[in-house]
Image: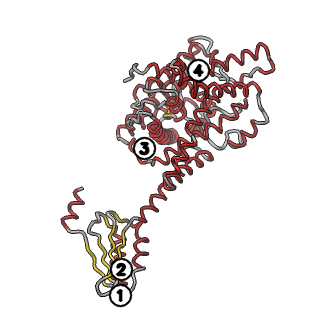
Amino acid sequence: MISLKELKHDFPAGVVVFLVAVPLCLGIAMASGAPLFSGIIAGIVGGTIVALISGSQLGVSGPAAGLAVIVLHAINQLGSFEVFLSAVVLAGVIQLVLGLLKAGSIGYYFPTSVIKGMLAGIGVIIILKQIPHAFGYDENFEGNVHFLEPRGGTTFSEIFKALHYITPAAVVISLLSLFILILWDQVLARKSKVFQLIQGPLVVVVVGIGLNMLFANYFPNLTLRDNHLVALPVAGSLGGFFNQFTSPDFSRVFSYEVLFLAGTLAVVASLETLLCLEATDKLDPYKRISPANRELKAQGVGNIVSGLIGGLPITQVIVRSSANIQSGGRSKLSAFIHGLLILVCVMTIPGVLNMIPLASLAAILLIVGYKLAKISLFKSMYRKGWAQFLPFIVTIVAIVFTDLLTGIGIGMAVAIFILLKNNTAVSHHLYEEQTADGRKKYRMMLAQEVTFLNKGNILDTLRKIPEGAALEIDYSRSAVIDQDVQELIEDFKETAHSKSIDLTIQELEPEEVEKFKSL
């Protein structure tokens, strides 16, 4: 249920998310090779339908940049946007089934170091991707998170290219916007509740529109061109607005191409949603835990609705969710307000929205990116040791140089490697003492769970037992002993005999074995 008790916090946050979401929806639609309005539809559905069903209080859903490449290839391969929409509907059905089967728990198996690396990586990506827009170089679409640019080049080459195409008005608007945002956040909002109610990003957008109008009237050479502004499709009438909605073509819904695409969309969208859900909960100042299975159901319903009316596939999106949290959002009402504002404004005032400079929005996103990738976060993770810091930093670098899911996959691989490495180091403890007759006596106490991964470590220790010593191998407290390790110990009996090692083995008592089995 949506509550109005946090309206004074959620409304301004919803406005900020709305301002950020509109160009992202359009940019992702453009990158997907789909009609621009399909991105707006996805934003509306994600902000309203999904927000109503979801259990996430701060997550914001909409079209995802991570799916843009899949969508682009799919539309080209199928040869029809309407057929593609049928795959979106089917993907939603699959997500709904996954939610009913409680598949959402997979999100809980990603380590905190990787999730925090994902947040910081997204922050770095936002900053790098918005620098060209802040300079007035707007050739690439808003919302792109891939290292390789769709028109060639990379994230870094686009920054250097932007330096050769600087638009003075955009730079002025960006710098002034950054100044206002920092002043608002660090000074004004702390002095008066009025400045907490009226969000800095809204002021920045109004100032950006006003400055560009000033340039148009008094400094025509500085006026921003249309490609430097938000570019919503404008319908001439209410009928024209509704004509922008598209129905899916189900004639090929059971073909291999559509079924395979639907499965791919469902899996990728679900994984991205669960990761963003986990990351959003990490950012939540109230540390609420969102129900993952309910989120999958909400996303499934959202994709069914989006596909039926001509929208792109939907996921929970960390950029918009982060903007929501950092703008003071406290409940799902802020996400709903953002979706409602998209619907109302594209119906009534698309011309006003098309006056918003992309440079103003770039400044807002630069602040969002900085808050996600603060230096204090890097210091905090470093103090936790290399087992935490290495997966964290690898995830960031991998996300910056690939994309979101690939980067997380690489970070997970590093985290698993460290886990396995640490696991082999705690397979046993070796105690040494001196007997009354001067012989050395060793006692090897095996861990509660010993797997084949510990085989090498145990073998290395056994090889170091000197000739003529006494050795007791104790696994009376071990719940699980892998067959490989048991064979290793059996084989060592021959070695012990040849080296005159007095070997005794203390095993788990039968009643203790049954006790562990019952657990």
Secondary structure found at label 1: loop
Earlier sequence position, callout 4 versus callout 1: 4
Tell me residue 222's x, y (percent).
Answer: 78, 21
Q: Are marks 2 and 4 in contact (CB under 8 Å)?
A: no
CA gap, disc 3 to disc 1? 53 Å
Which quadrant would the C terminus be assigned to in this image?
Answer: bottom left
What amino acid type should be assigned to the residue bearing mark 4?
Answer: Leu
What amino acid type should be assigned to the residue bearing mark 2?
Answer: Asp
Q: Is residue 244 above or below residue 167?
A: above
Name the residue nearer the viewer: 258 or 283. Answer: 283
215 on left or right of 252: right
The residue labelled by disc 4 is: 202
CA gap, disc 3 to disc 4? 34 Å
The residue labelled by disc 2 is: 491
Name the residue nearer the viewer: 89 or 154. Answer: 154
Earlier sequence position, callout 2 versus callout 1: 1
Secondary structure found at label 4: helix
Mark 3 burial class by Cα count in 10 Å: few <14, some 14-19, many 20+: many
Q: Is residue 427 above or below residue 271?
A: below
217 on left or right of 240: right
Mark 2 burial class by Cα count in 10 Å: few <14, some 14-19, many 20+: few
Earlier sequence position, callout 2 versus callout 4: 4
